[in-house]
Image (cartoon, grey):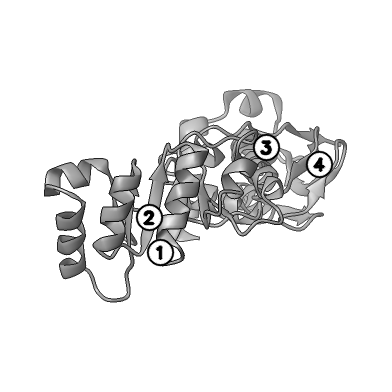
Amino acid sequence: MIMIDRLIEQALLEDIHTGDITTLAVVAGKRPASARLIAKEHLVVAGLFTAARVFSALAAEIRFNALLDEGASAAPGTVLATVQGDAAPLLMGERVALNLLQRMCGIATLTSSFVAAVAGTKARIVDTRKTTPGLRQLEKYAVRIGGGINHRTGLYDGVLIKENHITAAGGITEAIRRARAYIPHTLKIEVETETVLQVDEALAAGADIIMLDNMSLDEMRAAVAIINGRALVEASGGVNLERVRAIAETGVDIISVGALTHSPRAMDISMLMD
């Protein structure tokens, strides 16, 4: 929450800066007001607590009442929350609260579509580090609310040996050897592969998770057969809603989808004062 509050403070400073001149000019003195946050389209709710913290950062006495739980589905016209307090901070916080809420709902809604698309398979939908700078904690939270699973949070909490690491180390086997010597026993090693031959090498070198990067469906099926349960298998690259079911049916354990956080559509939500 400390990180989220800092993010909100910076967002408010960016928007209000030296003062909301429109509100200062138009809304004189204290004026009690109430407002409703309304879904304008079908969505999965995520981030109402963030909107609440935006308003409380401007005026501690503002009352924010979330009417739906996180993860709930909302139809067009659904009132997601009500806000009561002085009109000025409601107006000043409106855009920042909506910006964060709309994006988080967009991520949760998109994630839920991917999760539904692979239902009945063993594949799990996970996110990536392709997040908006500064918003990673909120965006990964929204993925979880949508039914997805978080991949590593950053460079500090998981080993993922990618193409450039392999080049710099001189090969997959050497990269895995160095990683194994460096990390504690509690961490697993994941290796990105682009060919079946690389899958063989990663498996022989003791990789715990093998990523199949931009492989065809036939290549994925072949790789899954070779690995045969000796490592977790992750599919990555070129994943979309039209293709994700076919990828899941190759037998992979994990499907990472960068689009969950790098290109979700913000949901249409409005704030209307009564």
Q: Nearer the viewer, residue 61 or 228?
A: 228
At mark 2, the secondary structure is: strand
The amino acid on which the numbered mark 4 sits, given as a three-letter code, is Arg
Mark 2 Cα shell of 10 Å, populated few (<14), some (14-19), many (≥20): many
At mark 1, the secondary structure is: loop
Kindly identify which residue carries mark 1.
231
Q: CA distance from mark 4 to mark 3?
A: 15 Å
Q: CA distance from mark 2 to mark 4?
A: 47 Å
The amino acid on which the numbered mark 3 sits, given as a three-letter code, is Ala
Q: In the rendering, at what x and y percent does residue 50 appear?
A: 61, 51
Kindly identify which residue carries mark 3.
88
Going from N to C along the chain, the mark reached first, 4 or 3, is 4
At mark 3, the secondary structure is: helix
Label ID, residue 83: none
Q: Residue at x 13, y 44 (%)?
A: 168
Instruction: Locate residue 71: give its quadrant.
Output: bottom right
Q: CA distance from mark 4 to mark 1?
A: 50 Å
Position of 248 relative to 207 (above/below): above
Mark 1 Cα shell of 10 Å, populated few (<14), some (14-19), many (≥20): some
Determine contact: label 1, label 2, CB under 8 Å. yes
The label nearer to you, 2 versus 4, is 2
